[in-house]
Amino acid sequence: MKAEALVGRSVTVAVPATVANLGAGYDVLGLALEMTNELTVQVTGVSASGKGTVTYGASGEGAEELAPNRTNMALDAVYRGLSIAGVTGADALDLAVTAVNTIPLSRGLGSSAAAIVGGLFAGAALAGTQAGASGASGACFESFSDPLTDKLFAAADEIEGHPDNVAAAIFGGCVASGRANGVLTARIIHVPHDAIPVVLIPDVRFDTAVMRAVLPKIVPIDDAVHNASRLALGITALEAGEVSGFAILSDDRVHQPYRIKKFTALPQLFAAALNAGATSACLAGSGSSVLAIVDDERGDEGIAAVIAALDTAAAATGVGGHAEQIEVDQEGVRILRSVGVK
């Protein structure tokens, strides 16, 4: 498809927040949450110079920090999505882009993954090709339901550098991802309906690169075996409908113990959630957010107790912020609106 054919088209996509790792699933597991960013992209023209211009506006989280050019991950990803979807001369397109962001930056909630996935899928949707893949628990997307989703997932992984967040952002729910024989692969993992996420979102931020730099290049074999067992046992428990699977997964020795050196309040935050009745507590991605899972059997009072305990601990340790209940997002990236797209 030629770029000129897209003038006048627009799409709006929504992408969920994601929590990577869940403890022992370092760079493997991701969980999507019902906190979404929306990206609206309109094709306004074709530049004679061959290099399109972007008019960009953002509101909400990080609005004042996001660049209005292709150094912005979301904007660059739109052009990549267009090209992946087969649009020739995509770089010449002039775009008007509006972002409405609720996912905070540098808190371990997948803001970069949301930007990348939102841009890629918006670009593909503008071309008139609605990528998507869905499957029941245990379904293996070694080859996706359409080749385009395969390409977009691979591009998102390449840009982000690891697939855990982008996989959850694309497919929704809880996802395990990685490469098998060189093929990017994802599996949907059942999340028990009784598992209620509570997220502490601190005021303090941590840069992902800095938090990765504190990790050792080599880990003791005992720690590697420990994490492998927790990953296998935790996933098996979740598939059996046991909320305790999250507690098994949270028992990590590969990344959280090292990141505590930078995030010294983490033990107190974990203890606050667990002492208040949470089933599990873990660092969200590389931080600074903390994910606690509460069994719905504890009722609204039990959930409120964990939220209050995390708020109190956050204030006492100086990390600030607030805790809130956020449901699991089962949909992943989706198209909310489109104009002129066939």
Image: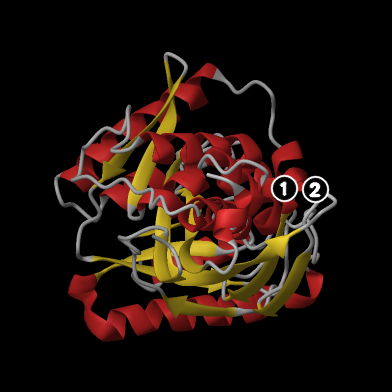
Do the numbered discs 2 and 1 sit on residues whose CB atoms are within 8 Å? Answer: yes
Residue at the outermost top position? 181
Q: Of the residues under marks 2 and 1, which one precedes in the sequence?
A: 2
In which quadrant of the rendered view does residue 53 lie? bottom right
* Numbered label attached to residue 50: 2
Q: Which residue is mark 1?
A: 91
Q: Which element type, helix, strand or loop, lies under badge 2?
A: loop
Judge from the rendering whether residue 60 lies leftward or rightward of residue 56; answer left or right.
left
The quarter in which the C terminus is drawn is bottom left
Residue at x 38% of width, y 33% of height? 147
Q: Residues within 10 Å of mark 1 (few under 14, many from 20)?
A: many
The residue closer to the viewer here, 245 or 205, is 205
For the question of whether residue 223 can be seen, the reply is yes
Instruction: Tell me the element at label 1.
Output: helix
Q: Nearer the viewer, mark 2 or mark 1?
A: 2
Q: Position of residue 104 (x, y in %)?
A: 63, 70
Residue 142 higher or lower than 256, as above or below: above
